[in-house]
Image (tube, rainbow, N blue to C red):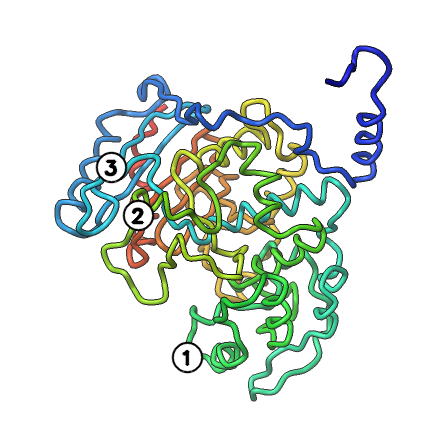
Amino acid sequence: MLNLSGPPHRAVRLFLALAALGLASAPALAKTVDAKVSSIVRADAAGLGFDPAKLDVARQSLKADVASGKIAGAYLLIGRRGKVAFQEGFGVQGPGQTTPVSDETIFRIFSMTKPVVSVVAMSLVEQGRLDVDAPVSKYLPEYANLKVWQADGSSVVAAKPMLVRHLMSHTSGLIYGFIQPNAPISKAWAAGGENRNDLTAREYARVLAGLPLKNEPGAAFNYSQSTDVLGAVVEVAGGKTLDVLIRERITQPLGMNDTVFFQPETKRARFAEPKNNQPGVYFDYAKPTPYLSGGGGLSSTTEDYLRFVLMLAGEGQYKGVRILKPETLARMRQDETSPEIRRAGLFFPGPGMGFGLGFSLVQDEKVQRPGAGTFSWWGIAGTEFWVDPKNETFMVFMVQARELAQEYQRKNRAWIYDALVK
């Protein structure tokens, strides 16, 4: 056992020296949150400012959706000031199953992976190992000579470099081909290997570097493979694979033991499955591939993801475990778009919104129901979360219903803010 009562032990002095240089990994001596103690701390809904009768509208609506066969199941959690006012599972984990949905049911969270990877990136920024204003080519050399798609199908050399913050804000010029699958550029991307999953994150980023950009970097918002490329950047900057970096910097410290890229077969009894299992959409949780998708590869539970949400609501800290400094999280919540950038692309967050370094941002609460400053994101299967600092509210919603994602986004906002009465 080390005796630390006298002068600092040599190993400790060495760690502190390395940490000052950004060469030591903080989790080595960091506190961790007990994974066995639930993140769900219940409180009286009325005491938190919610009308219980109006929250019951959400309950009855989700029950009706299960009863009608619209969905197999879902989970909704609503909270304020760190306490949970409403949390309930509805239906069963999948068609033909009898296991009820619970806060331990494992869901594919798809693009809710993006904020996690973005937080990992910013933890590296704090250590001086990553610069959001640096060219991506500093970390991935193949991004030094990018080309931009032209209307006639040709391409020209990009006039500006792609920066790391362009990846985090989806202003990189990269695309998701499935959004406009019949567009010529999308067909070129499909032919060029966009849909491969047999490569590592680093190898996949190299494939995308050879495909044409839709716009000059920084010129337009287009939801895209940007966070997948960010995953490769993070691997280079962090010196480890993405799964290890996520575990060391977020999930292990926060006690998020069920949040991983690929689940063990022993947890299959907890997997949520969709009513409509569309081919090529819902990956097998327990079938690993070489590809660790920073843009959509994680699965998680409501209880696990709430830990991440409460860390964000706590200005980067949860139960005494600090993941980010408050000023770092504040930087992530600065809008990286402009009216021109939003008009030039396909701005999925919608009117009254902006986009920061990994989150959508509510700018005009007269257009968007949550309070100004709310930051959030969602996944293609309908999962979503938000943190509303103005109203001190947060939510996590889990479902596996791609076709209903936007419908439930609208309903969640109505259910929650109609019920918030004081």
Q: Earlier in the sequence, mark 2 or mark 3?
A: 3
Give the secondary structure at mark 2: loop
Q: How many marks?
A: 3
Label 2 – label 3 distance at C-alpha: 21 Å
Q: Disc 3 designates what residue?
A: 58
Which class describes the residues within 10 Å of circle 2: few (<14), some (14-19), or many (20+)?
many
> In the drawing, does residue 327 fall left or right of residue 410?
right
Label 1 – label 3 distance at C-alpha: 38 Å
Q: Disc 2 designates what residue?
A: 272
Residue pushed farthest left?
A: 68
Q: Residue at x 40, y 45 (%)?
A: 384
Disc assigned to residue 375:
none
Q: Residue at x 41, y 25 (%)?
A: 38
Disc assigned to residue 182:
1
Q: Nearer the viewer, residue 290 or 178?
A: 290
Q: Nearer the viewer, residue 338 or 156?
A: 156
Q: Earlier in the sequence, mark 1 or mark 3?
A: 3
Residue 271, given in percent of the width and then of the height, sits at 32, 46
Q: Residue at x 47, y 54 (%)?
A: 297
Residue 383, given in percent of the width and then of the height, sits at 37, 47
| Rendered position, 75 above or below 130 | above
The amino acid beneath tag 3 is Ala
Give the secondary structure at mark 3: helix
The amino acid beneath tag 2 is Ala
Residue pushed farthest front?
A: 1
Label 1 – label 2 distance at C-alpha: 31 Å
Q: Earlier in the sequence, mark 1 or mark 2?
A: 1
